[in-house]
Structures are given as structure tokens and as C-alpha cells.
Image (cartoon, rainbow, N blue to C red):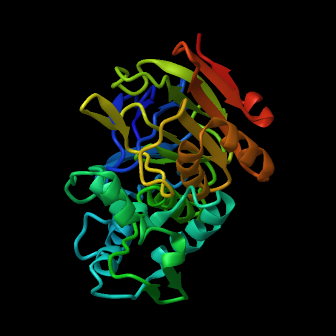
């Protein structure tokens, strides 16, 4: 996910990109953020999970937790990164181990929950398809209907089972990929660390996923910008669609307009439908989801991009604690929006 952050007294403009599977298109805006002398907000950023992170929090004792947080993120990476050959998930995908850890157990449980709530639209076993289409952690293959059908034989959450320490695969070709949920979970992990330190005002952003609590340095609610889903909008924050006021909530956005390729005149997006085996082709351009925790927001944002506008709207209206903002196109290519009622109260369209 791509995002730009704007700060005032420590005002730096930063570009960032999420990892290989899912991009978000959000910009963090700390608008007119004039840090008060009596406040002591600490800001730092860095790199993790193949992307960047940005953290701001109020620290009465002026303690900078960057070193501890980077150690925490490095530990997280050794569990869930498909790009780390020694990670827990990589060893499971290579059938070298079936042992899990706390991080993997958490995302397995949440993945199962969202899989069931979305009738399989969110499925972590889609990894072989994502890889084959050229959007994963392996090289692209030559795709045919026969190839897709052959891969679909070992796709599906019913292909795995797990308990508190072990995961079992029905077929050794099954692979799991947490890129559609791990980034959001890492935000929750860092936010939990800050809260255990007694911090009550913070913003944590990793690869475009965001969680906030309390107020910003201006003693106001944190504000998050959402980019317009146009293919040439490559600079996050340069062309905003809307601004959302976030209050003790998490936010994630998924979309198809930046991660795609064209082959033989056909456009292929990075969002793969785990039931059909093909990239999605519908009018929904981006889905922004607000939830209590970022792991939930991240997973549902991905699922909504698979489901499309109408199914996603019906689903989000049926789940307590979820809000969503959808950007879609009509037959003439115009950009339109649809959002849940509660979202309308905290969002400002940019003219």
C-alpha cells in the first residue's frame, strides 16, 4: 500500500510502498500539525517487511522506542515473511516443518474467521495462484485454463487444519501467504507494544496500514487521506479522493489500479479470485475498511476487492464493527463512491 505522511514541525513528505501482494492507497495527513511546547511527540520511521513504517506517539518521559520496535518487527518477519527463507511460514510452504508460532497462530485464526464470513473470498491458500500469475514470491508461469484448473485442485482453506502448535496440509503443494493480512497484524503488534508502555496517543503506520489512538500533536483526531484510484496517480497524497478522521480505530485500503500488468491486450490485476483462479474484473477500484484492529481491516479490504461492490456493501452492513468506503467506476469510467452510514460521518470528500 502506498501512502504519504505530512508533518508540520517535523514535516517530512515520505513515499512508501506495501509488499508484493496488496497495495493500499492512503496518505496520512497530520494537517496543520503545530506541535505545542508542552507536548512531547516522538516521530520516527524505517524499513520493515519490504516496505516502510512511520510511528508517532506522545511520550511524557521522552523515551524513543525505535530500537525495541525494530527488534519486534524483525522477530515478526521471522514468522510470517514469505520472502525470508528461514521464516516459520517459508519452512511450512517447503514442507520442512509443520510447527507454528504465536504470530502464525493468530493470523490463522483470523484468516479462518474472515474466510468463513466472506464465503471464501479471503483465502490464504491462494498463494500458488498468485505466484503463477506473477504477483507472488515465485516467478510467473505461462497460464492457460488447464493450468488454472490444475492449481485450483489444491486451493481452499479446507486444505489445511491447525491447532495450537501445528499446521497440517492435505496436499504438499498447498502454500499459504499472509501478505493480505500480516501487514495489518504487524500494526496491531506495534500498537499493543506502545499501549503496554502506557502510551495513549499514537499513530502506527506500516506499509499503508494504520492504527490510531487518542489525538495528534495538535490535540485533534488523526486524519487519513485516501488517494484517487487513477492509474497515473503514482505519488501517494498528490491527488486525494477523501480525508477520513480516525479516532481509536484501524484502517486499511486495498485496490487494483497500481498493481497490474497487461499481456496480449488483457489487463491482469493482482487481486486473484481464489474460487475462479483468475484476476478479478469488476467496477470496484478500491475498498477502505475501518475496524477496531488492523488485522481485521486488512483482511476485509482484500476480500472486498474480490467480492466487488454490491456483495461487499451487503456484507459490511451485516458485520458489526466494520465500516467501509468504496470507490468504483460507472460504464462511462466516472469515479463514484459508496460508503456505510457511519463512514459518512467521519469522511470529507476532496473537491
Residue 296 lies, with reference to residue 322, above or below; the image says below
Q: Residue 307: give x, y in percent of width and height.
A: 59, 45
Work out whether residue 49 can be spotted. no
Residue 321 lies, with reference to residue 264, above or below; the image says below
Residue 296 lies, with reference to residue 17, above or below; the image says below
> Which quadrant holds residue 234?
top left
Q: Residue 253: give x, y in percent of width and height.
A: 52, 40
* Quadrant occupied by the N terminus: top left
> Which quadrant holds residue 17?
top left
> Which quadrant holds residue 325?
top right
Residue 205 lies, with reference to residue 334, above or below; the image says below
Q: Residue at x 51, y 61 (%)?
A: 185
Numbered marks: total: 0
- Which residue in the rendered view is the most extreme toward the front? 146
Q: Residue at x 71, y 42 (%)?
A: 323
Work out whether residue 294 can be spotted. yes
In this rendered view, identify the residue nearer to me: 219 or 156. Answer: 156
* Quadrant occupied by the C terminus: top right
Q: Residue at x 45, y 87 (%)?
A: 168
Q: Residue at x 60, y 63 (%)?
A: 115
Q: Is residue 106 left or right of residue 291?
A: left
Q: Residue 258: give x, y in percent of width and height.
A: 36, 33
Q: Residue 225: give x, y in percent of width and height.
A: 53, 28
Amino acid at each position: 500500500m502506498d501512502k504519504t505522511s505530512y508533518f508540520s514541525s517535523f514535516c517530512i513528505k515520505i513515499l512508501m510502498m506495501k509488499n508484493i501482494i496488496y497495495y493500499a492507497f492512503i496518505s496520512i495527513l497530520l494537517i496543520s500539525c503545530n506541535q505545542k511546547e508542552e507536548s512531547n511527540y516522538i516521530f520516527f520511521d524505517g524499513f520493515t517487511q519490504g516496505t516502510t513504517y512511520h510511528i508517532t506517539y506522545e511520550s511524557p518521559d521522552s523515551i524513543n522506542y525505535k530500537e525495541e520496535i525494530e527488534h519486534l518487527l524483525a522477530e515478526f518477519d521471522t514468522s510470517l515473511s514469505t520472502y525470508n527463507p528461514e521464516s516459520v511460514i517459508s519452512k511450512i510452504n517447503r514442507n520442512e516443518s509443520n510447527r507454528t508460532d504465536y504470530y502464525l497462530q493468530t493470523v490463522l485464526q483470523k484468516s479462518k474467521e474472515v474466510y468463513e464470513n466472506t464465503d471464501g473470498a479471503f483465502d490464504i491458500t491462494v498463494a500458488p495462484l498468485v505466484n503463477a500469475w506473477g504477483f507472488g514470491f515465485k516467478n510467473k508461469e505461462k497460464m492457460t485454463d488447464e493450468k488454472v484448473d490444475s492449481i485450483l485442485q489444491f486451493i481452499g482453506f479446507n486444505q489445511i487444519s491447525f491447532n495450537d502448535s501445528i499446521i497440517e496440509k492435505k496436499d504438499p503443494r498447498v502454500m499459504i501467504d499472509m501478505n493480505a493480512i500480516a501487514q495489518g497484524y504487524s500494526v496491531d503488534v506495534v500498537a499493543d507494544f506502545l499501549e503496554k508502555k502506557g502510551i495513549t496517543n499514537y499513530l502506527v503506520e506500516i506499509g499503508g496500514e494504520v492504527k490510531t489512538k487518542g489525538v495528534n500533536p495538535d490535540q485533534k483526531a488523526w486524519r487519513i487521506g485516501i488517494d484517487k484510484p487513477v492509474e497515473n496517480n503514482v505519488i501517494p497524497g498528490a491527488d486525494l479522493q477523501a480525508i477520513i478522521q480516525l479516532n481509536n480505530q484501524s484502517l486499511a485500503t486495498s485496490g487494483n489500479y497500481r498493481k497490474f500488468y497487461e499481456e496480449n491486450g488483457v489487463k491482469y490485476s493482482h487481486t486473484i479470485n481464489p474460487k475462479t483462479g483468475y484476476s478479478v474484473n469488476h467496477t470496484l477500484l478500491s475498498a477502505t475498511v475501518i475496524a477496531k484492529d488492523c488485522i481485521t481491516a486488512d483482511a476485509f479490504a482484500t476480500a472486498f476487492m474480490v467480492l466487488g461492490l454490491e456483495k461487499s456493501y451487503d456484507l459490511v452492513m451485516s458485520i458489526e464493527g466494520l465500516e467501509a468506503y468504496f470507490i468504483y467506476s460507472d460504464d462511462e469510467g466516472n469515479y463514484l463512491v459508496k460508503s456505510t452510514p457511519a463512514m459518512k460521518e467521519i469522511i470529507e470528500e476532496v473537491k
